[in-house]
Image (spheres, rainbow, N blue to C red):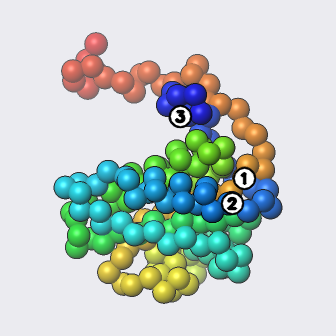
Amino acid sequence: MENFSELIKTRRSMRKFTDEELNQEEVVTLLKAALMSPASKRSNPWQFIVVDDKALLKELVHCKEHGASFLGEAALAIVVTADPLASDVWVEDASIASIMLQLQAEDLGLGSCWIQVRERYTATGMPSGEFVQGVLDIPLQLQVVSIIAIGHKGIERKSFDEENLQWEKIHINKFGGQ
């Protein structure tokens, strides 16, 4: 990637992936980005579960009633969890790690998509986090925030069009201030 501005313009949610697997260097680079994520007071409340087993990926598709079906086609998923006892801002820290994974994936030329797990439910009404914990044997003290699906891009998407920026949502000095 040329620079950060280009990176954030080209990063788009990818829900279609090729069958190509990721190589070890790509996976290590992704995990380094996650482990270098900023965290409040360097508490690092996050932990990551890397899933590349196709049967598990297909099972994780059911973590939400809608919005996770593409997970079964991803090369891998990184489940982002955090320990609420390690930090009072564990949700924010895990969210930052999630986007760091997505930005690193884009920089590698890979596609990714965030699957929201926290505060979501399966088709049967079970909390999505509880479902994922059961599938992956995640300890109860860790809360699942997201699953980041990653793989080689199955389609090309246009970069974000700056003409669509909502400048009206920017306020100077105070809300509504000009």
Residue depicted at 23% across the width and 57% down the height:
42
Residue found 50% across the figure and 68% down from its top? 79
Left or right, 31 with reference to 53: left
Q: Nearer the viewer, residue 5 or 132?
A: 5
Which residue position is annotated with label 3?
Answer: 8
Mark 2 vs mark 3: give the one in front.
Answer: 2
Observer-side mark, 2 or 1, equals 2
42 left or right, relative to 18: left
Label 2: which secondary element: loop
Image x and y of residue 85, in percent: 22, 73
Q: What's the CA distance linking mark 1 and mark 3?
A: 18 Å
The reply to whether callout 2 and callout 3 are in contact (CB within 8 Å) is no
The residue tagged 2 is 22
Quarter the C terminus occupies: top left
Label 2, residues with CA under 10 Å away: few <14, some 14-19, many ≥20: some
Q: Amino acid at mark 1?
A: His
What secondary structure is found at the residue carrying circle 1? strand
Q: Position of residue 21 (x, y in %)?
A: 73, 62
Q: Which mark is residue 152?
A: 1
From the viewer's perspective, tell me whether residue 55 is left or right of residue 114: right
52 with respect to 166 (left or right): right
In the rendered view, would you say 139 is above or below 146? below
Nearest to N terminus: mark 2 or mark 3: 3
Q: Which kind of residue does numbered mark 2 sit on?
A: Leu
Residue 73 seen: yes
Question: Residue at 53% across / 47% down in the picture?
Answer: 104
Q: Return the disc, 1 or 3, that comes first in the chain's sequence.
A: 3
Disc 3, SS: helix
Position of the N terminus, as image quadrant, is: top right
